[in-house]
Image (tube, rainbow, N blue to C red):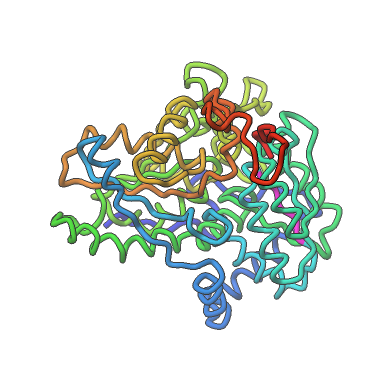
Amino acid sequence: MFDYQYPDAAGHFGPYGGSFASETLTFALQELRAAWARYQHDTQFQAEYQRELAHFVGRPSPVYHAQRLSAEIGGAQIFLKREDLNHTGAHKINNVIGQAMLAKRMGKPRIIAETGAGQHGVATATICARYGLECIVYMGAEDVKRQSPNVFRMKLLGATVVPVESGSKTLKDALNEAMRDWVANVDNTFYIIGTVAGPAPYPAMVRDFQRVIGEECLTQMPELLASLNLAAQQPDAVVACVGGGSNAMGIFHPYIPFEATRLIGVEAAGEGLDTDKHAASLQKGSSGVLHGNRTFILQDKDGQITETHSISAGLGYPGVGPEPAWLQALGRAQYVGITDSEALQAFHHLCRTEGIIPALESSHAVAYAMKLAKEMRPEQSILVNLSGRGDKDIGTVADLSGEDFYDRPSMRGLKVKGSDKQHEPHHRNV
């Protein structure tokens, strides 16, 4: 078994992690650390958390054998951990519920959050509506445009969505603005960070709320593998996309002791790792401090953060959590890149072989699993964390694919019964 006990008391994962925060936030972080230390082992807190996961989120999420996909690709059997079936459509809700429960106990009625793809924002708006908390979500103006369905969902749920016009107008800039808000409103505000980054205790706390994903898989996989007459008890490889790293750490962490299971994180290679249009912090970045923790970040020779590019808004972050960086340093996890075009191809392939529309973020993991399966034997298996559903991405996919929702001749000029008016095609991003 792989011996792994991290982080240390100061929130360090080897040389990574820690807490680099302004004096104003130091007290807020100390307050949060104390609350988390109190409640993470509190039986009433944990019982309430488990009830919420079961009755509000709909856990456990199933593991699904992608039989047609596996047969078409050849090689290893591909399994999907169906986080897309959770309430709100992604893994984000697992963590948001836990942090919102802490906020209630700490007497913080105002919640702020940042979001890229919008799934964390939707999850935060959802739980704030459930608990009667004020909700403000910061989102890069560019992401607001390409994730408009999720913006509308957040507003329906009562959240205030603040478009961020600074910098690259994406996730990094949304996080910057959320941090500024927290500094200005620290007394009554709880910041729900959506990934395993930020100052301690966020990286470990978010991981602990997300590790339910991998813990379920540990009990689900033996039965599934046995049903296919496969000798192994656990998968040969676990694959997850990596932006900040919450869905990856959620499924990786329980598997860390299982040395026979490879852990593979998939970063956004964008237009290629040999270009400057990607978001591959672990493969192309270097050590530095970003958003309160030391980790691997994309920066120039002067230490300035460089812009990222990805087809998926949720992977367009110029850093990564400290724990994924430490797992790479230990050699326990490896990280690879998938380009925009490869992710788009995997998106379509999963739609048409399994009837599942994946998020573009998750499509990166599916794309690498499809590559890896060909190099493996039929009696081996790959477990993919399908971290979210792709409803939010259909406008982007339609535009990138050059398709029209009314692309069949029989659909153009479609008439509705009882009306002489023809329908105009809907705008793709509505």
Tell me if 135 is positioned left or right of 348 in this view. right
The main secondary structure of the magenta stretch is strand
Q: Which residue does the image show at 52% across and 16% down from the upper left? A: 275
Tell me where residue 158 appears, x and y as whole percent: 78, 59
Q: Which residue does the image show at 46% across and 55% down from the upper left? A: 83
* Extreme residue toward the right, this view: 184
- Residue 27 can be seen, yes or no: no
Residue 68 counted in the magenta span: no
- Residue 273 can be seen, yes or no: yes
Is residue 323 shown above or below 309? below
Residue 112 counted in the magenta span: yes
Tell me if 409 is positioned left or right of 327 in this view. right
Tell me if 10 is positioned left or right of 226 in this view. right
> Residue 430, located in which quarter of the rendered image?
top right
Q: Which residue does the image show at 31% across and 57% down from the upper left? A: 257
Tell me where residue 236 appears, x and y as whole percent: 24, 47
Tell me if 374 is positioned left or right of 91 in this view. left
Viewer-side residue, 198 vs 401: 401
* Extreme residue toward the bottom, this view: 44
Viewer-side residue, 257 vs 227: 227
Tell me where residue 192 appears, x and y as whole percent: 68, 57
> Residue 143, located in which quarter of the rendered image?
top right
| Image mark count | 0
Tell me where residue 323 appears, x and y as whole percent: 49, 48
* Extreme residue toward the top, this view: 275
Is residue 204 shown above or below 45? above
Viewer-side residue, 288 vs 161: 161
> Which quadrant is home to the N terminus?
bottom left
Q: Which residue does the image show at 56% across and 32% down from the upper left? A: 411
Viewer-side residue, 318 vs 315: 315
| Magenta stretch bounds | 111-115
Is residue 9 shown above or below 304? below
